[in-house]
Amino acid sequence: MKLVRSFYFYILILLLGVSCQSKKAKQERPNIIFIMSDDHAYQAISAYSDHLIETPNIDRVAKMGMLFTNATVTNSICAPSRATILTGKHSHLNGKIDNHFPFDTTNVTFPQLFQDAGYQTAMFGKLHFGNNPKGFDQFKILPGQGAYYNPDFITKDEGRITVQGYVTDIITDMTLDWLENERKEEDPFLLFYLHKAPHREWLPAERHLAEFTQRTFPEPATLFDDYSGRGRAAKEAEMNLLKHMNWAGDSKIYPEVMDELGIPDASGWDKGAFEREVGRLDSSQRAVWDQYYQPLNEEFKKNYASMSEEDLMRWRYQRYMQDYLGTIQAVDENVGRVLDYLEENDLMENTIIVYTSDQGFYLGEHGWFDKRFVYDESFKTPLMIAWPGKVEPGSKSDEMVQNLDFAQTFLEAANIPAPSDMQGESLLPLLTGNEAEWTRDAVYYHYYEYPSVHMVKRHYAIVTKEYKLTHYYFDTDEWELIDRINDPQELTNVYDDPAYAEIKAELHQKLEGLREKYGDNSEISQRYLDEYLDYLEETRRFGGANKEVVQEILENRISSKK
Ligand code: SGN
Ligand code: CA
């Protein structure tokens, strides 16, 4: 009897041990909070440089963890970047090459794998896929680009809703509400907290207008770039602050003031963009908004006639920075609210916190706004990752990491096997101080969305820490080689300089190797191009400043088919 009793006792202990262990193992899986803004340039984060704005809260993530100074994207545009993040695959494989067609939801995304593995999953903010995210217990996302003021949301449980207030605050309220009221304490979570800001048309919260509409900011060295050292792609892009920025939608010159001054609606959707955004304010909100923008319009009216092109460029840069950085002020405050919540609720310990953007952005460098190019300001993206106890506080890495790497990093951290066709590399060796295990010395880039808004030609590239070799292959056939060390502003194409003959040959070979490794080639590029041009031919859905160029491309195509 005694023997039997002690046998049962032994079994009981064993079972208890197993269940404790499995509970512990369960708890040990880290929570993940993925904070991503839209178009947030690293130049506008004080952990990188404080010449434009102080972002003390975003910087907290870098202070707690690792700051990446060479983080990049595989395709510098919104939805494709998000697709690469979720699938761990380059655009040509996940199919989301540009912002036009919806994301192919037969792709396997890492949140689905987390959900299958027992994680709680939630997403709040901007996704921009043209369909709803898979693998989420809860989501509230902006339709398309979303709006800054009194925005609409597509929600999992309540259909489409409109919420009064400022988008950055609202997305944060939703995130905090989920953490507080929906999250179950016993299971780990994967949470996407995705800001719309600081995306065009850069509309700050009411509370920041007084300060930001008054500030002046230092100009970048290349504000007046004439693109003389580079080829047609840089020269023909429509991203110049003076020539291609909207007066109403972007610079907040009232449509009626444009009329008074005889400024044409050059893009064809300038006044519409203003209405789309500012028109969402109710009358009392609008009255507050006008308090700040009205005097600015009055002043501009007075000065316009006497302003030179150079004056106008400078004025537009300041206007741009006032609004763009104003929207970042709200992002920083709200990131602070989320970090405070984690601290106050003992959630810091076992949580991976990421702050990043879907790509970088031009803040007047090369005279530009927007992104798309493989030049640094849009190819690189801010990235900091904290994981208390695992990542050394205040550490830095200059390794060439990419948005392609997130999926495998998180899967490894959560001990979930990654599908073998994912193409990134886990960042855990870098995060945990095992640099020797990291061997990547070059990354691959491919941008597709052309002909389209901003008119940046299709290109693919190889980038190492020292060089960039780029091929613009459609509507031109140009190679560009940039010496990143000696020409950090990327002003001179040295492709035909004999001094670079050897390195050029080496890079060509390496580029071919990368294309093979990732499974990209000109046949695939041609297929995507044909699909897009067929669509343009059929729908004629193009317009604005680039209308004639697109028409010419299509006519050439039709006549070459004959
Ligand atoms: C809109 C913007 C463009 C921007 C694209 C893509 N114009 O068309 O400036 O490049 O989105 O942005 S806007 O006046 O309508 O804002 S992305 O972040 O979604 O890729
Ligand atoms: Ca973006």
Image (spheres, rainbow, N blue to C red):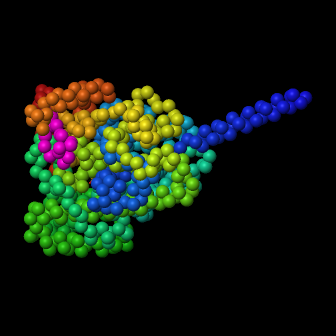
Q: Nearer the viewer, residue 300 or 73?
A: 73
Residue drawn at x 15%, y 37% as measured from the top left: 480
Does residue 229 appear to the left or right of 120 in the view shown? left
Q: Is residue 506 above or below residue 102?
A: above
Residue drawn at x 29%, y 45% as measured from the top left: 380
- Image spot of residue 152 (x, y percent): 41, 56
Q: Could you tell me what secondary structure mostly forms the magenta stretch? A: loop
Does residue 442 appear to the left or right of 310 in the view shown? right
Q: Is residue 410 above or below residue 386?
A: above
Range of magenta residues: 472-493
Q: Nearer the viewer, residue 231 or 100?
A: 231
Q: Is residue 456 visible?
A: no
Does residue 289 appear to the left or right of 246 in the view shown? right
- Identify the image quadrant of residue 289: bottom left
Does residue 120 appear to the left or right of 293 in the view shown? right
- Image spot of residue 178 (x, y percent): 53, 53
Q: Is residue 337 above or below residue 478?
A: below
Q: Is residue 470 visible?
A: yes
Residue drawn at x 37%, y 60% as measured from the top left: 55
- Image spot of residue 559 (x, y percent): 11, 31
Q: Nearer the viewer, residue 345 or 97?
A: 345
**Residue 484 belongs to the span the image colors magenta:** yes
**Residue 3 belongs to the span the image colors magenta:** no
- Image spot of residue 241 (x, y percent): 18, 56
Quadrant in which the N terminus is drawn:
top right
